[in-house]
Image: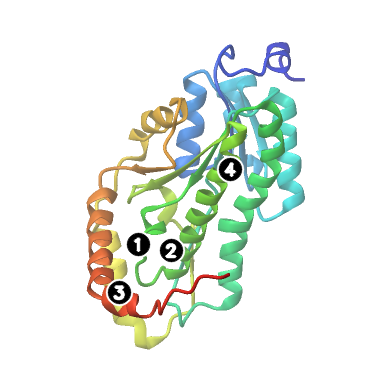
Amino acid sequence: MAPQQATTDTSTASAPGKVWFITGASRGFGRIWTEAALQRGDQVAATARTLASIADLTATYGANVLPLELDVTQPDQVQTAVTQAHAHFGRLDVVVNNAGYSLVGTIEESPAADVRALYETNIFGTLAVIQAALPLLRAQGHGHLIGVSSGLGLVSLPLIGYYCSSKWAFEAIHESLAAEIKPFGLHVTLVEPGAYATEFGSEQSLKFAPGLDVYTGLRTQVMERLKSSEGGDPRATPPALFAVVDAAEPPLRFFLGSQNLPWIRGAYAERLATWEQWAPVSEAAQGVSRQSH
């Protein structure tokens, strides 16, 4: 049963803390943010594909955590988990779509089935959570949807092009969503981390496409570069996330870490320069404007 206070008072102003729903809470950012939210006195519905991977949270945080088994690629499970979490705590203030993984392989190498599976988790799983949560958030009159994207949702790299493409789609969906639900008093933020020393590079978070010999050199070069890059400390991130969710007017996009801004600034400067260079050709393709009568 939900605490009486949670069921009778759904205003965030008078609530003792925020109520979170977090997917992918067993490791990486999901685990770190779950524990950080609980440590500051918030309540969390923590979800993971296997309940055993998050069952230990109850021993430490008691009734403030609700562990739920959830495979985001199963829409019925998503609906049940979101509904159960809302009923248990009486409201949901912050919904964090964090579950996801990366497919490693060139565009030519990666089987279509692997690309579809990637999108089932990274895109359709996210959509299932959003669509299950929105009616509840709209009815309660407040709520903040956090989509864990990446700097790779803005710039693509070789060998992980399909993962990047899923994040580009992720970005577009959330940008449209933000405009659509703003009139209801709901917020959307895309959290875009740079490279961090999380389990995202582990076997559980990576799937490798069958390799073609012609790409062996590229694969070695890219993987060596990734291994040698210095990742940020994921345990330094909770205060930044809390600043975003506690803000009266949170940003639509938020870089996590120091790496992305200079990288993206350079990438966008290059894009603008190319568009400017080709502007005369582009403008000539407009033709003569015609007004309808």
Indicate the amino acid at tag 2.
Cys
- In the displayed structure image, the side of residue 272 where residue 146 appears, left or right: right
Q: Position of residue 43 (x, y in %)?
A: 58, 23
Q: Position of residue 36 (x, y in %)?
A: 46, 28
Query: Residue at label 1?
Result: 155
SS of the residue under disc 2: helix
Q: Nearer the viewer, mark 2 or mark 4?
A: 2
First reached walking from the N terminus: tag 3 or tag 4: 4
Residue on which the image places disc 3 = 220
10 Å crowding of disc 1: few (<14), some (14-19), many (20+):
some
Secondary structure at numbered mark 1: loop
The correct choice, above or below, for 64 with respect to 275 in the image is: above
Mark 1 or 3: the one toward you = 1
Amino acid, disc 1: Val
Q: Quadrant of the N terminus?
A: top right
Q: Position of residue 231 (x, y in %)?
A: 29, 49
Q: Which residue is mark 4?
A: 23
Amino acid type at circle 3 is Thr
Residue type indicated by callout 4: Thr
Picture quarter with the C terminus: bottom right
Residue at mark 2 to residue at mark 4: CA–CA distance: 20 Å
